[in-house]
Image (spheres, grey):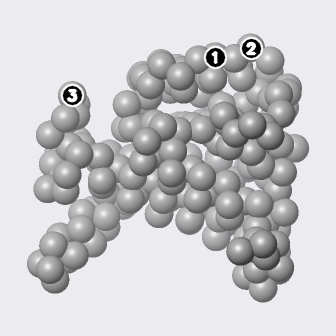
Amino acid sequence: MKDKVNLIVEELKTTTELVDSGSIDRLVEMIYQAPVIFLAGAGRSGLMVKAFAMRLMHMGKTVYVAGDVTTPAIQSGDLLLIGSGSGETASLVCMAEKAKAVGASIATITLYTEASIGKVSDCIIRIAASTTKSAIDTGYRSRQPMGSLFEQCELIVLDSVIMKLMERYGISEAAMAKRHANLE
């Protein structure tokens, strides 16, 4: 097992080092400015953005996961963050286009910056986590199954955004813990 864990850790290190820090800074600023943040993703990428939504809630941000029954309408000035390796998931493309039409800002975390979602995004964080399914060559092929490397990096990148926001807002982990769910 240790050899597999070490392989994963090395792939994470190699891939996250390729993420543009400027795009992270742009996302931090967009989150800081947005009155309401909406998050969307499908499959495992969607699970990563849900984890991010939880941390934003812990910070006191008004945040919703698109598709939940209590999610309100997105408005001008709000932010929609989409996690999509392909950038072409039909339901997510539709959400991005609708959000853009009402004047919301769009950020995406993707492998494919020129995909449909990337073309309407104001901020793109590219995670160069190629798999055997990828159509483009990033210079490195993951040995993990399917999109695992992308999804793991997505969570790590989003956790780094939380850490930057904690610094910017001056929010401690103790303050965040006070907002943790207590109906468990």
Asked whether residue 111 is in view, the answer is yes
Q: Position of residue 179 (x, y in %)?
A: 82, 72
What residue does disc 2 label? 101
- What is the residue that sits farthest to the front in this orientation? 184
What's the amino acid at mark 1?
Glu
Determine whether, in the image, residue 57 is placed left or right of residue 88.
Answer: right
Circle 3 crowding by C-alpha within 10 Å: few under 14, some 14–19, many from 20: few
User: Horizontal placement of 77 versus 128: left or right?
Assistant: right
* Total count of labels: 3
Disc assigned to residue 97? 1
Percent x, y for residue 4? 15, 73
Given residues 35 and 19, the one toward you in this image is 35
Residue kind at label 3, given as amino acid type: Ala
Q: Could you tell me how far apart the alpha carbons at marks 3 and 2 are, in whole angstroms? A: 30 Å
Q: Earlier in the sequence, mark 1 or mark 3?
A: 1
Q: Which mark is residue 173?
A: none
Q: Quadrant of residue 57?
A: bottom right
Query: Is label 2 in contact with label 1 (beta carbons under 8 Å)?
Result: yes
Residue 6 to residue 32: above or below: below
**Which of the 4 image quarters holds residue 165?**
bottom right
Residue at 19% of width from left, 56% of height from top?
A: 144
> Neighbour class for label 2 at 10 Å: few (<14), some, many (≥20)?
few
Q: Is residue 21 left or right of residue 180?
A: left
Residue found 15% across the figure and 48% down from its top: 141
Q: Is residue 25 in sight in this rendering?
A: no
Q: Regarding mark 1 in the picture, which secondary structure is present there?
A: helix
Q: Residues within 10 Å of mark 1 (few under 14, many from 20)?
A: some
Residue 135's disc number: 3
Q: Quadrant of the C terminus?
A: bottom right
Q: Residue at x 31, y 67 (%)?
A: 13
